[in-house]
Amino acid sequence: MKRYLLTLTALFMTIAFLVSCSSSDEKTSTDNTKPMAKTQTSAGTGAKFMALDIDGNFHTSEQYKGKPLILNFWGTWCPPCRKELPDLKKIYTEYKSQGLEIIGLAVNDTPEKVRKFAKDSGIDWVMLIANRESAMSYSIGTGIPVTIFLDKDGNETSRAIGARSYEYFKSEVEKIL
């Protein structure tokens, strides 16, 4: 009986992990040069965030009006989130001089874990701890990573569910600059 309960518990934990961390929806075209990604696009405004950063400072979406912005809902514990990190870092390095901001919104993480992970990974953009309200405001669902692109007026131009590549990020960033 113990073995059965242990197996059942392991099965449920595996399912919970798979549901909580999205895989990439990205597919490659037949010529293997251009990624084709599923995205959801919304021209709407109205979604906002209010959250604390990893040092306890309060941030709101209003602070970033006038700047092209990437919101990246992610987690230190999420393999697809870690997979796309080098490409996000490369994008930020290339475009921050043009005003691009990236806000990392860590889901189901503590400030201590995020601070250590960011330091060890060389992440130099703002890291916030996502709260339920910010996640609901942007309708991110249960899987991460979710990356949302906002133009200078705060309008959502596109979103990606699952890990993405440098080429995808570049094409979306060029639309919001």
Image (cartoon, helix red, strand yellow):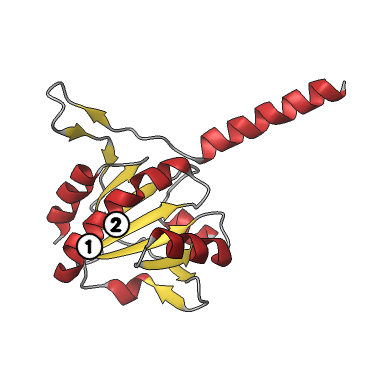
Query: Looking at the image, which residue is at 58% across and 62% down?
Result: 110
Q: Quadrant of residue 22?
A: top left
Q: Quadrant of residue 128?
A: bottom left
The label on residue 168 is none
Pick the residue in front: 118 or 75: 118
Image position, residue 3 (x, y; %): 82, 22
Cα–Cα span, label 2 and label 1: 6 Å
Query: Looking at the image, which residue is at 38% across and 47% down?
Result: 146
Image position, residue 177 (x, y; %): 13, 62
Q: Is residue 128 left or right of residue 175?
A: right
Q: Is residue 168 above or below residue 51?
A: above
Image position, residue 109 (x, y; %): 56, 57
Q: Is residue 29 left or right of residue 53?
A: left
Mark 1: few/some/many CA within 10 Å (<14, 14-19, 20+) = few
Q: How many numbered discs sit on the rendered protein?
A: 2
Mark 2: few/some/many CA within 10 Å (<14, 14-19, 20+) = some
Q: Secondary structure at mark 1?
A: helix
Q: Secondary structure at mark 2?
A: helix
Which residue bears the numbered disc 2? 89
Q: Is residue 4 left or right of residue 150?
A: right
Query: Looking at the image, which residue is at 16% across and 26% down?
Result: 32
Q: Is residue 94 left or right of residue 137?
A: left
Image position, residue 26 (x, y; %): 28, 33
The label on residue 93 is 1
Q: Is residue 149 above or below residue 165?
A: below
Q: Amino acid at mark 2?
A: Lys
Q: Is residue 5 above or below residue 138?
A: above
Q: Quadrant of residue 127?
A: bottom left
Pick the residue in front: 62 or 5: 5
User: Which part of the image, by quadrant, shows the N terminus?
Assistant: top right
Query: Looking at the image, which residue is at 60% across and 36% down?
Result: 16
Q: Amino acid at mark 1?
A: Thr
